[in-house]
Image: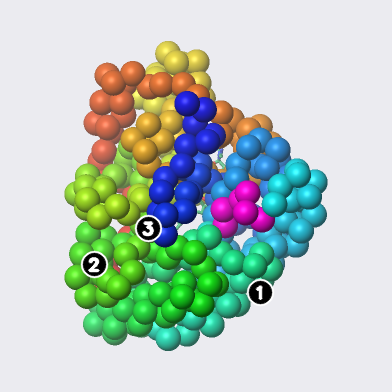
Amino acid sequence: MDCTNMKFQLQSGRLMPLIGFGTYLITGDQLIYQVLDQALASGYRHIDTATVYHNESSIGRALKTLLPKHKLKREDIFITSKLAPIDQGEKAFSAVQESLRNLDCGYLDLYLIHWPGAGRVPVDSEENRKLRSQSWASLAKAVNAGLVKDIGVSNYTVKHLNELLANDCGVKPSVNQVEWHPKYYQTDLLNLCRREGILLQAYSSLGGTGNSNLLKDPVVSQISTLLGKSPAQVLLRWALQQNICIIPKARSAEHIKANIDLNFVIPNEMMTQLNNLNSNEKFAWNPEVVA
Ligand SMILES: NC(=O)c1ccc[n+]([C@@H]2O[C@H](COP(=O)([O-])OP(=O)(O)OC[C@H]3O[C@@H](n4cnc5c(N)ncnc54)[C@H](OP(=O)(O)O)[C@@H]3O)[C@@H](O)[C@H]2O)c1
């Protein structure tokens, strides 16, 4: 199957493309237009943004021109945004409305609680638990009001997810978006998500934007040479081959095209070699510290 068309059925019954386009640190009307034009031309139909990326309005403006240009309708693309930690609590409902105004796209396909903690609340405070529970109830209201089709979470550990499932669950999360690559993945979290029908979505699949050496890892490089694929393609295919959603971010046209060109198979023994790289090496923020 052409992996560009791989989809996962969310809690609402709606389908989400397993390959999305990440937009963290991509801002400004001109750059957003340029990368989304390339992304849509390359076949991406899923865009990941967040309130704290400060690019929702640019994305909204770009899509007004780009959808007709690429002969697409609103319903042909999947748009995710996320709740800023500072908006945790009952403010979450108006935060969805604000994201929707910025993106100006009628409805959001998915809205995530970006982080289990709340802005300006100490990470170890019990207040975090109370506020994220209120956020979840507010997001469920946003679903009922037709503002958003599915809701989910991001950076939830097994503890945060179990707590949500036990206490707050009129509506189950559709997605948990977490840091996930061969040097950092958590099988217990994946198993919990799969048991509950929650899609695990990987971020920083390429090691993020900092100074990670993931793309230069010798095992990744060796497999990339043997398969005739780039290290980035190997890392993305590693996740996709396990039915994990990916949202690689790229600015260069060459990278944008390559990151969705994943119709190859990593043989089992190479998957094992990649799995064996797991060393708890994180490149992004650590949610384990949030009460
Ligand atoms: N929920 C969360 O807390 C959270 C946290 C982090 C990220 N995210 C989401 O996940 C998305 C992806 O994660 P990320 O932004 O951390 O980074 P990433 O996708 O791991 O890596 C992006 C970096 O890799 C480079 N790159 C992209 N394609 C490449 C290729 N084919 N070959 C070589 N280098 C390549 C990019 O360079 P160029 O730009 O120069 O092409 C960029 O510097 C974000 O954009 C965001 O939407 C969510």
Measured Cα–Cα span from mark 3 to mark 2: 14 Å
Measured Cα–Cα span from mark 1 to mark 2: 30 Å
Farthest residue, direction top: 226
Q: Residue at x 30, y 73 (%)?
A: 170
Q: Position of residue 214 (x, y in %)?
A: 41, 36
**Which amino acid type is shown beneath numbered disc 1?**
Arg
Reading the image, the residue beneath label 2 is 165
Q: Nearer the viewer, residue 108 or 200?
A: 108
**Which amino acid type is shown beneath numbered disc 3?**
Gln
SS label for mark 3: loop
Q: Residue at x 46, y 75 (%)?
A: 144
Are discs 3 and 2 less than 8 Å apart at CB? Answer: no
Residue 54 lies, with reference to residue 269, above or below; the image says: below
Q: 10 Å neighbourhood of mark 2: few (<14), some, or many (≥20)?
A: some
Badge 1 residue CB within 8 Å of ligand 1: no
In the image, is residue 289 part of the stretch drawn in magenta? Answer: no
Q: 10 Å neighbourhood of mark 3: few (<14), some, or many (≥20)?
A: many
Region of the chain picked out in magenta, as a range = 74-79
Reading the image, the residue beneath label 1 is 101
**Which amino acid type is shown beneath numbered disc 2?**
Leu
SS label for mark 1: helix
Q: Is residue 264 left or right of residue 67?
A: left
Q: Give residue 11's mark.
A: 3
